[in-house]
Structures are given as C-alpha cells and as structure tokens.
Image (cartoon, helix red, strand yellow):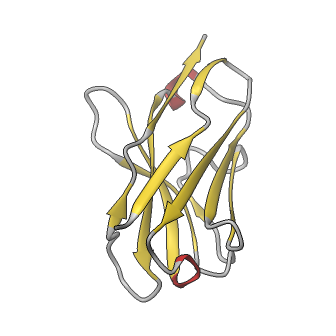
C-alpha cells in the first residue's frame, strides 16, 4: 500500500519560512519523480514544484521561483519543499505526489498539509 504523508505545515507571518516534508512508503521511491501541488480555498489545484527521480532538473511554478526549493533524499524516501519569503497568497493545502519516472501523470497523492500565511 502506497502512502505519502506530508508534514511541516502551519501558520507563519508573511516573510517567514516553512519546510514541508513528504515521507513515502510502499513504492520504489528512487524510481518515482516527485512533485508538490497546492490548493487554496475556492481555487483549483495548481502545480508548485517537481523533481526527477535522482533529484535533478527541478522545475517551479513562476509564482514560487526564487522563493521555494524542492529537494529529495532517496535514502529516507522523503521529498522536501523549503518555502522562504512566504506571502499570504501562498496560503493553501500543500500536497505531494508521485509519478513513475517515465509517466506524464501522477499516480499517488498525499492528504496534504495546511500552510497559512498571515499578513
């Protein structure tokens, strides 16, 4: 049974930082590309960042470039999202997701962790 469990969300003031973690189990982690997505109230889910199976080729949504950093530790089956210079518009539920390295769509999703940025 595949599980993706996010942690690290919380309430932070604008300009602050948070580090999200996503621990994966039940899948060969090093063969999966990983991504972070977010969904704000009343809005559709949007892409935030993604990383290939070896930790290279990170890509980011324009809205978070220069502020967020995605990374992974394959020995720990964990992907991270370091979020700096947070803005109120970053408030959302953040989900991690996993896709086979050759696939176009994500196979597995976590339940999400809430990030709230106050102004």
In the rendered image, the vertical position of residue 118 relative to residue 50, given as above or below = above
Residue in the image at 62% along x and 61% along y: 78
13 on left or right of 97 = right
Q: Quadrant for residue 74, please give it.
A: bottom right
In the current view of this chain or complex, which residue is farthest to the bottom?
Answer: 102
In the rendered image, the vertical position of residue 64 relative to residue 43, given as above or below = below
Decide which of 119, 4 is in the foreground and name it: 4
Q: Quadrant for residue 84, please give it.
A: top right
In the rendered image, the vertical position of residue 17 relative to residue 11, given as above or below = below
Residue in the image at 52% along x and 67% along y: 34
Q: Position of residue 2 (x, y in %)?
A: 38, 66
In the rendered image, the vertical position of residue 18 relative to residue 72, given as above or below = above
76 on left or right of 98 = right
Q: Position of residue 52 (x, y in %)?
A: 58, 77
Residue in the image at 49% along x and 65% along y: 25
Q: Position of residue 16 (x, y in %)?
A: 74, 24
In the current view of this chain or complex, which residue is farthest to the top?
Answer: 119
> In which quadrant will I find the N terminus?
bottom left
32 on left or right of 39 = right
Q: How many marks?
A: 0
> In which quadrant will I find the C terminus?
top right
Residue in the image at 44% along x and 71% along y: 26
Q: Position of residue 97 (x, y in %)?
A: 43, 60
Decide which of 91, 89 is in the foreground and name it: 91
């Amino acid at each position: 049974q595949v599980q993706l469990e996010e942690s690290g969300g919380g309430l932070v003031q604008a300009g602050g930082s948070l580090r999200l973690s996503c621990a994966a189990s039940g899948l060969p982690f090093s063969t999966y590309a990983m991504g972070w997505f977010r969904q704000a109230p009343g809005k559709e889910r949007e892409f935030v960042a993604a990383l290939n199976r070896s930790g290279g080729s990170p890509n980011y949504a324009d809205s978070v470039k220069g502020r967020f950093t995605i990374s992974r530790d394959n020995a720990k089956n964990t992907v991270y999202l370091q979020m700096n210079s947070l803005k109120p518009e970053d408030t959302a539920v953040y989900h991690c997701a996993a896709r086979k390295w050759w696939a176009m769509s994500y196979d597995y999703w976590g339940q999400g962790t809430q990030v709230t940025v106050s102004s």
